């Protein structure tokens, strides 16, 4: 099977115009799969399901496989209402980012098991497959060595997707850190995250970029980038690589990944060319079973399991 | 006939002395973990091996208390270690297993159908559709809710499921949704999900500098304290960071959850378990917290309408709280 390239959902709150022009660009970019929808905050409401479906149809017309992604932290009846509508859309596949979503999709329609379902072992992967998952996205903290046995024993037909480029979505809270920054309660947040199309960088007290605040989500400041691991990804039989969108340079990043996948550019050169396109420096520690923020040089040392205490 | 409603006080036991302290001071249930990464408080010198597990279960059962075993991490390798832990629980008459991983739940259900299963807070179930998923597939009878819901949301959730609900009432406060936080592994390589630790002690370094006392986690500066400030453990979401020129507790202050004043409400919606955080804390902590909550629950049960928090309780709990501050956390909506 040929490796495919996916564009993950936009994790930030962008205006309708910004999303429209962004996805017009993506329609022409060499990605195979596009995930659409609000996965972070239920208060973000500029785009209704009908608006997402309009974008979905446009991208579908341009030859992309479109998947609708669900919210990750589902807390209220109104969140569930939105979720049910997505689950029952009838036209597009759905990425489930919560077990509540799996509950609504299982046995009815094939779905994609998103990165937040905590699938960490072959037993759980088989279980999810039996409910109708046709693809799963590995947890961002999963290493190459943990993935390997999962690949060897994965259920027939199950595709594997790896978050391969972007600021890592590391945590979700019910608290909004953007509202907290502005000294506002979440219920009166005034949607100020609209002013932060790439979130807000949180630095340590010695000025090092550390994390990024994106509403209730916390991301890494560094950019997870596995372009240098292309051979290993191919060898492991990974089916889909996910690029996480940024407002700038996403199409160029997609292009470079595509060039690497098709062996037109070698991974070292691609990584070099990405340096000026990334919002911050690269990291890949998770892939090597180490702290996520580390950047390992190719074929680095693999860590053991959790330290014995 | 409906069994009479009761709110269980569920106390932490990081050691045999802590277990005895919990039972002797009125805990209805204690929860504990094994001495490895199968549970989310995998700290040096803490937890149980097979021998003291047996003693603990015997001690608790003799005094009418229940014992729950937390196996609430996600196995990524050495599956058999988790499997043996489930077998051990079954062999030792554990009253319930607290699990997060669906694969483990499936194993427990098939191999030991008599075992009661609880969904761990690490399972991240924040809505009734998710909880009912675990009920339908694995027969869970209780779910521990992540500390992210407002009380109104808890009530809404309770109406949508037959699964018993357990809430955190007191102790350390996760500001992130449990089971959905990889901040610790991003900095140190080890997270609650995969290793049962957050901001692990072995990654901590303290350093006196000209600018103040610095706490670092795997080299990352988490906070810096002036001479007149109390230094806290560098849990990474409770450090001070700089955002657009402002340095502050960008995620959360060092503070503890305390929901004493919510007791009448918890009873009104028939919450079944009130969980005290702190398996890493001393027997003295367990004694103090269990005693206060026992008294409060008994008083509230007798007469919820006239219940009010006694200043002596607040004072006693205040002494053992992180940062010596209290919050209702997400249960109180404006916290969000």
Image (tube, coloured by chain):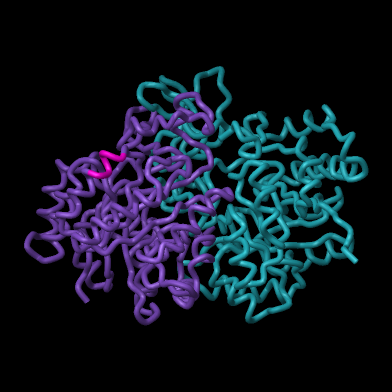
Chain colours: A purple, B cyan
Q: Is residue A18 magenta?
A: yes
- Give how far across and how far down residue A280 sits, in percent: 24, 39
Q: Residue at x 72, y 38 (%)?
A: B259
Res A280 seen here: yes
For the image, the number of numbered tags is 0
* Residue B216 position (above or below residue A48): above
Q: Residue at x 28, y 52 (%)?
A: A55
Q: Residue at x 71, y 55 (%)?
A: B165
- Give how far across and how far down residue A296 sits, in percent: 26, 53
Q: Residue at x 22, y 66 (%)?
A: A4
Quadrant location, the C terminus of chain B: top right
- Which segment is the magenta one? A16-20
* Residue B273 position (above or below residue B308): below
> In which quarter of the view is residue B172 placed?
top right
Q: Overall secondary structure of the magenta stretch?
A: helix
Q: Is residue A134 magenta?
A: no
- Give how far across and how far down residue A303 sits, in percent: 37, 60
Quadrant location, the N terminus of chain B: bottom right
Q: B297 left or right of B109?
A: right
Q: B303 left or right of A75?
A: right
Q: Residue furthest toward the right?
A: B302
Res A304 seen here: no
- Depth check: B231 or B96 in front? B96
Q: Residue furthest toward the left?
A: A264
- Depth check: A176 or B158 in front? B158
Q: B158 left or right of A85?
A: right
* Residue A16 position (above or below residue B50): above
- Give how far across and how far down residue A269 sits, in percent: 9, 54
Q: A221 left or right of B139?
A: left
- Depth check: B266 or A66 in front? A66
């Amino acid at each position: 099977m040929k490796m495919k390239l996916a564009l993950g959902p936009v994790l930030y709150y962008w205006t309708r115009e910004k999303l429209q022009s962004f996805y017009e660009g993506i329609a022409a970019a060499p990605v195979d799969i596009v995930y659409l929808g609000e996965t972070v905050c239920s208060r973000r409401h500029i785009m209704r399901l009908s608006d997402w479906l309009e974008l979905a149809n446009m991208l579908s017309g341009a030859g992309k496989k479109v998947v609708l992604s669900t919210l990750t932290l589902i807390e209220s009846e109104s969140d569930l209402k939105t979720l049910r509508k997505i689950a029952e859309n009838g036209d597009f596949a759905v990425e489930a980012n919560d077990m509540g979503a799996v509950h609504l999709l299982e046995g009815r329609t094939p779905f994609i098991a998103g990165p937040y379902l905590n699938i960490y072992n072959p037993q759980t992967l088989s279980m999810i497959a039996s409910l109708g998952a046709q693809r799963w996205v590995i947890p961002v903290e999963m290493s190459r060595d943990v993935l390997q046995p999962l690949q060897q024993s994965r259920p027939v037909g199950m595709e594997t997707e790896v978050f391969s480029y972007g600021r890592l979505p590391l945590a979700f809270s019910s608290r909004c850190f953007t509202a907290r920054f502005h000294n506002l309660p979440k219920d009166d947040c005034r949607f100020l995250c609209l002013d932060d199309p790439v979130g807000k960088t949180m630095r340590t007290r010695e000025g090092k970029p550390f994390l990024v605040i994106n509403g209730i989500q916390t991301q890494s400041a560094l950019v997870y980038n596995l372009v240098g691991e292309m051979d290993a990804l191919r060898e492991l039989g990974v089916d889909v690589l996910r690029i996480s969108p940024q407002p700038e340079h996403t199409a160029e990043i997609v292009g470079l990944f595509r060039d690497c996948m098709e062996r037109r550019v070698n991974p070292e050169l691609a990584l070099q060319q990405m340096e000026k396109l990334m919002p911050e420096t690269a990291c890949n520690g998770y892939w090597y079973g180490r702290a996520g923020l580390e950047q390992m040089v190719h074929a680095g040392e693999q860590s053991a399991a959790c330290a014995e205490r | 006939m409906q069994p009479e409603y009761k709110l269980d006080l569920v106390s932490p036991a990081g050691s045999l002395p802590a277990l005895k302290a919990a039972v002797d001071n009125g805990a209805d249930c204690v929860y504990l973990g094994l001495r490895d990464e199968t549970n989310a408080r995998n700290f040096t010198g803490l937890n149980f091996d097979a021998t003291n597990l047996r003693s603990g279960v015997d001690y608790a059962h003799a005094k009418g208390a229940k014992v729950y075993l937390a196996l609430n991490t996600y196995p990524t390798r050495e599956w058999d270690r988790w499997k043996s832990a489930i077998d051990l629980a079954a062999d030792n008459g554990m009253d319930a297993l607290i699990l997060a991983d669906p694969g483990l739940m499936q194993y427990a259900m098939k191999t030991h159908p008599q075992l009661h299963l609880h969904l761990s807070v690490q399972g991240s179930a924040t809505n009734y559709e998710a909880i009912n998923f675990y009920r339908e597939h694995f027969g869970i009878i209780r779910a521990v809710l992540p500390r992210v819901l407002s009380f109104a949301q808890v009530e809404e959730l309770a109406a949508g499921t037959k699964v018993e609900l357990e809430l955190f009432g007191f102790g350390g406060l996760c500001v992130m949704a449990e089971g959905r936080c990889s901040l610790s592994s991003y900095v140190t390589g080890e997270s609650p999900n995969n290793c049962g630790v957050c901001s692990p002690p072995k990654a901590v370094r303290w350093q006196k500098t000209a600018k103040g006392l610095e706490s670092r986690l795997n080299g990352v500066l988490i906070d810096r304290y002036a001479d007149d400030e109390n230094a806290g453990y560098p849990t990474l979401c409770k450090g001070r960071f700089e955002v657009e020129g402002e340095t502050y507790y960008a995620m959360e202050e060092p503070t503890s959850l305390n929901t004493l004043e919510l007791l009448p409400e918890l009873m009104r919606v028939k919450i079944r378990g009130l969980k005290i955080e702190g398996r890493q804390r001393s027997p003295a902590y367990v004694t103090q917290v269990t005693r206060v909550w026992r008294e409060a629950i008994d008083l509230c049960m007798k007469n919820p309408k006239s219940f009010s928090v006694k200043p002596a309780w607040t004072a006693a709990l205040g002494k053992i709280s992180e940062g010596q501050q209290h919050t209702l956390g997400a249960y109180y909506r404006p916290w969000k």
